[in-house]
Image (spheres, grey):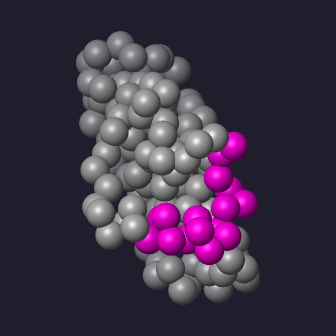
């Protein structure tokens, strides 16, 4: 059983049962598998949907440079990271995911990257 979450992230129910994870006690844990930069959004969305389930995230371990090399487009990778952070900031207020702390230096980098034009993956909204 899989459930689409954010972007390419998917939730796979550990035991593979065709029952709802919303029923407490039916599915005790879920493995979240996705792209490295999607771990936090997938987790935040899953916890919002199924607060009684334990979640574990997994993605291919790699550095930012390795990931950019694998995509062969460093600008696109930065755009995707900026868009993902925007969603982490605005989706909790829209009820799509739980709120997560974002360090001040990350927020400053986000604003700087937006000012420098890394905006192709931003949602059409007043960004935080």
- Residue 6 in percent (x, y) is at 57, 42
Residue drawn 48% across the image and 55% down it: 85
Q: Which residues are magenta?
A: 109-124
- Residue 17 in percent (x, y) is at 47, 25
Please say if 103 is above or below 53.
below
Residue 77 seen: no
Please say if 82 is above or below 92.
below
Residue 61 figure quarter? bottom left
Residue 75 figure quarter? bottom right
Depth check: give the residue in front, 9 or 29.
9
Asked whether residue 56 is drawn in magenta, I would say no
- Residue 99 in percent (x, y) is at 33, 39
Residue 105 seen: yes
Depth check: give the residue in front, 45 or 20.
45
Residue projecting furthest to the top: 23
Residue drawn 43% across the image and 30% down it: 93
- Residue 27 in percent (x, y) is at 34, 25
Residue drawn 66% across the image and 81% down it: 74
Q: Quadrant of the N terminus?
A: top right
Q: Is residue 20 left or right of residue 7?
A: left
């Amino acid at each position: 059983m899989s459930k689409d979450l954010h972007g390419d992230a998917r939730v796979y129910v550990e035991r593979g049962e065709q029952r709802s994870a919303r029923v407490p006690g039916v599915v005790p844990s879920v493995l979240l598998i996705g792209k490295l930069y999607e771990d936090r959004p997938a987790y935040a969305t899953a916890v919002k949907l199924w607060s009684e389930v334990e979640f574990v995230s997994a993605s291919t371990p790699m550095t930012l440079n390795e990931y950019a090399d694998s995509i062969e487009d460093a600008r696109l990778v930065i755009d995707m990271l900026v868009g993902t952070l925007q969603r982490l900031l605005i989706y909790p207020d829209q009820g799509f995911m739980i709120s997560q702390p974002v360090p001040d230096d990350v927020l400053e980098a986000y604003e700087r990257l937006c000012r420098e034009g890394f905006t192709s993956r931003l949602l059409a909204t007043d960004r935080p």
